[in-house]
Amino acid sequence: MKNSSLFLILFACITIGYAQENKIDYTSDRTITDEDKYPGALLFSKVDNQVFFTHEGINVWCDQAIFYEKDQFFKALGNVKMKQGDSITLTSKYAEYDGETQFAFASNQVNLQTKTSRLTTDTLFFKRDVQQVFYRSGGTVRDSATTITSKVGRYFLEQEKLSFLHDVLVKNPEYTINSSQLNYFTQSKHAYLYGPSTITGKETQIYCERGFYDTQRDEGYFVKNSTVNYKNRKLEGDSIYFNRSKNFASATNNIRVTDTINHSVLTGHYAEVYREKDSVFITKRALGAIKQENDTLFVHSDTLMITGPTKQRLIRGFRDTRFYKKDMNGKCDSIVVNEQLGISKLLGKPVVFSGENQLTGDTIHLLNHPKTNKLDSLKVFYNAFMIQKDSLGGYNQVKGKEMFGLFENDELKEVNFIKNTETIFYSRDDKQQLIGINTVISSSIKIEFQDQEITKIYYYKNPKQILYREGDLPKNARKLKGFNWRGEERLQSKNDLFKDKPTPTLTKIEGIPLPSNEEPNFFNNQKGEKIKEKIHESSRLNKELLAPREEDKMIYETEPEEN
């Protein structure tokens, strides 16, 4: 019996101790009651010291308080301060706290201070059981370098994560961010953007509908309808990396770089842009479309690079370069376009097709008129060769050490061959009947064209000419030394720029996941019960104020990841 009695006494003591530990404790200089106005409540007020409450790790100070001890609920008024450990301090003019649900409400000049940031708002809700804070009347968060404002915000204190919704604005000395939803980690200074978002700096503006930004290192990664806009250049791609301090951006898959001043567009599947150097590097099915007066020049290379400011640009294409425009096309290994000098240099086995003429040589230069910027002339250096295919299957040919040609309205009007020139022509009468095959050796030759047809040929300095009947000139003598017909390489349309080229394998884009699905309704407790069903009858809150609103819903992982 004695042992049983002792056990009951010990059990009772433990139970009483546990109950006391879970009760809200308080101290007050002055305590009164007023059953008419505040039935069942204790009224506390400051004399020398503020009213003080403590409950399971939270301490509260205020000038006045109304405490419903039976319900473990109090309302705090005047210079309210709530402190949780050494990491969270909340101040306001008014606050409520429910010891059973551990739900707090603060209003009027609310400030929430953590180790890394400060939140100010007019109205704040605090669920201590899950360490989450919520506001929906507008709020501002400040850290060492960044200020963030939004209409709705949710603070996950243990994860040091803030979710901002509606009219989100991030202000930093170097840029501003506007977003429909932004998640921000106060420790790492990392921001995740969801929905239409822009990042605006002095020289750039970024748009995306899903992205990541390191606000400390000033760099980011963007997917889903992403663009980077410079003053005169826009970069688009399936994914974009951006580094402000290095003035650098790169893009992967379905790239498009638009130059609004020079009226050019670059496409491909990988690109790098260096703003300070005013340069673009693009590869993987790289294609440049350069607007000209009445036409567009398309250039394809394995790699395209554009450097330099407007009117001083260098456009370079490396490895298997092809170009196409309405009246001219061709191929070479590499191309260098100097816009300031108006020269396009075709290097490495170049061939140009103009009308029915094939032009080849060791190096070919295409020159634009300095004032009109229209194609004006061309130069072929060393082993210059022009070939036209005759209707009988033979070839009209002209060769020399060098060649100079003149254009008019993008059509070849005149060519001049110099040094060691030779020709083979199929001569015809006015009815296009074959007269014979004419071979000529001379010092130089001038040829004139009309509607891309040869109309006149001039031979200079003692030409040696022989006209053969067709049957008298052996077939193996009908081709000049160095003859190389490359008609199969002619581009019939811009689609031939990629003829016989494999479609590149695109890089798998590492997407940015949506946030994990926390309890979407803040006003539910951990059991999914509605907090509005448990509010105290004397609370300033009501069921309407705690009802979930459609406009408060954050974006969560409820849709499939697109990238």
Image: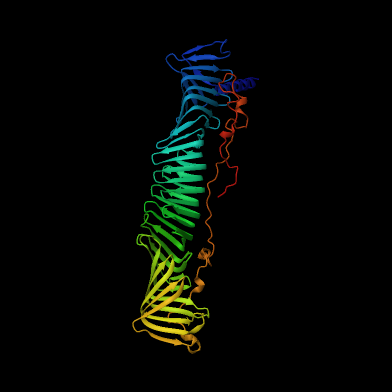
x 44%, y 75%: residue = 455
Relative to 509, 344 lies left or right: left
Relative to 516, 264 lies left or right: left
Answer yes or no: is residue 160 visible: no
Answer yes or no: is residue 51 visible: yes
Residue that lies at the very extreme toward the right in this rendered image: 1
Residue that lies at the very extreme toward the front in this rendered image: 430
Which percent across, then down, holds residue 529?
A: 63, 30
* Residue 336 position (above or below residue 76): below
Identify which residue, 93 or 339, lies in the foreground: 339
Which percent across, then down, holds residue 496?
A: 52, 66
Identify which residue, 525 or 7, lies in the foreground: 525
Relative to 338, 91 lies left or right: right
Identify which residue, 24 or 296, lies in the foreground: 296
Residue that lies at the very extreme toward the left in this rendered image: 461
Which percent across, then down, holds residue 271?
A: 45, 56
x 54%, y 14%: residue = 42
Identify which residue, 550 or 505, lies in the foreground: 550
